[in-house]
Image (cartoon, rainbow, N blue to C red):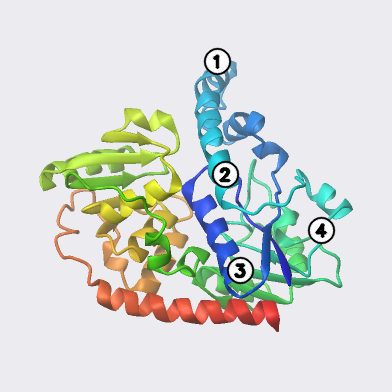
Amino acid sequence: MKVAFITRHTPSNYGSVLQTFATQKAIEALGHEAVCINYIRTDELPENQAKTHLAISRWNKNAATRLLYKVTQKPVFDAATKRFDVYRSNMLKLTDEVWNTPEQLAENPPKADIYMTGSDQVWNTVGTGVIDPAYFLSFVPDDKKKIAYAGCFGTKTVRDEDRDNIIKWLKRYDHITIREKSGVELAKSLGVDAEQVLDPTFLMTPQNWLDTLPKKEKKESYVLVYQLHPNKEFQTYAKEFAKRKNMKLIRVNPYFHHMFKPGKFVFCPPVEEFLWYIKNADYFLTDSFHGTSFAIGLNTQFVDVLPNVYSERNRSILATAGLEDRILMSYDDFKIADTPIDFTAVNQKINAERTRSAEILKKIIEE
């Protein structure tokens, strides 16, 4: 069967590309054809990214700050987009046609046997703070099969003004699975049944990911930091952590303004090299959900710095792996990583969940 899935594949970050790639591979592993619907919201088009981020930024105060933001940030977004366009082109099977609005999708939907919502905050507010019906498969005719694998709300609640529409859209699905436990509970509070499954990146085995890594020699010990959210305390902590370990601090990020933060900056390396840096780090500090996920999957010693927003994602996978003790509770705690993670126990839990999640994906596609 042909499965057309829609997900957040356009943001220029590693998690978006890797979870889309893993979803594609998981469907293909079941013997079906997978294609990612090339849906790029108008406000997420390359030429609009700086403007979109400005609308929800603290820089949106007056004409002077807005101008400064556009002048300094547009090159940042453009550079990341250029790099990730290459990664998307090399890794993803996208529809030839591109859609920019839910209306365009409804007028001319892609042809498929099954339509699927993927993962990574698809049911959260996007762009300028709106719920997008396209990610709820609003464009799919009633008589077509609709499923969701590892759907994500990103929060524990939905806004009152969105509630009725979300219920209406979710009840059109034939099967729903959700990534976070809190998301399953939220769906049930809306009168919708759902099962919890792993993020699609876990459906590929660690060896699958290791096989993609470049044959590159590690020359020195290092602490790796992958930081997505503004947090000066995290930056200071990472610098001091590396100093106490007597190791080089390496910072990897797809946006070049991170060169001004502590650590040797590696700008937007290829996806395989990004994973190489995680696998080979002596210690890994991150506030990223997918950073956390790959640290778990690749068995890297790590510390999780919960972001101020959407931290439920991190908490959920850490609970599944039994690693809630890796959450940094104080920026004065430099002993958190002194006790190595017992990855034998972690791997047993993740392997069991991987098997169960893959079986559920097979069931919801083929049932």
Real-space Cα separation, disc 1 to disc 4, in angstroms: 41 Å
Measured as percent of width and height from the top left, residue 200 is found at: 52, 65
Residue at the top extreme of this rendering: 64
Numbered disc 3: secondary structure: helix
Real-space Cα separation, disc 3 to disc 1, in angstroms: 50 Å
Circle 3: residue type? Glu
Q: Nearer the viewer, residue 288 or 124?
A: 288
Numbered disc 4: secondary structure: loop
- Badge 2 crowding class, 10 Å Cα cut-off, few under 14, some 14 to 19, many 20 or more, is some
Q: Splitting the image into 4 quarters, where does residue 117 fall?
A: bottom right
Circle 2: residue type? Pro
Real-space Cα separation, disc 3 to disc 2, in angstroms: 23 Å
Up/down of 261 relative to 328, above or below: above
Circle 4: residue type? Phe
Residue 22 visible: yes
Q: Residue at x 82, y 61 (%)?
A: 111
Residue annotated with mark 4: 139
Image quadrant occupied by the N terminus: bottom right
Q: Which mark is nearer the camera, 4 or 3?
A: 3
Real-space Cα separation, disc 4 to disc 3, in angstroms: 24 Å
Measured as percent of width and height from the top left, residue 66 is found at: 57, 21
Q: Earlier in the sequence, mark 2 or mark 4?
A: 2
Residue annotated with mark 2: 11
Residue annotated with mark 3: 28
Up/down of 87 relative to 155, above or below: above
Up/down of 343 relative to 109, above or below: below
Q: Earlier in the sequence, mark 3 or mark 2?
A: 2
- Residues tagged 1 and 4 counted as in contact (Cβ below 8 A): no
Q: Residue at x 52, y 24 (%)?
A: 75
**Figure label count:** 4
Residue annotated with mark 1: 64
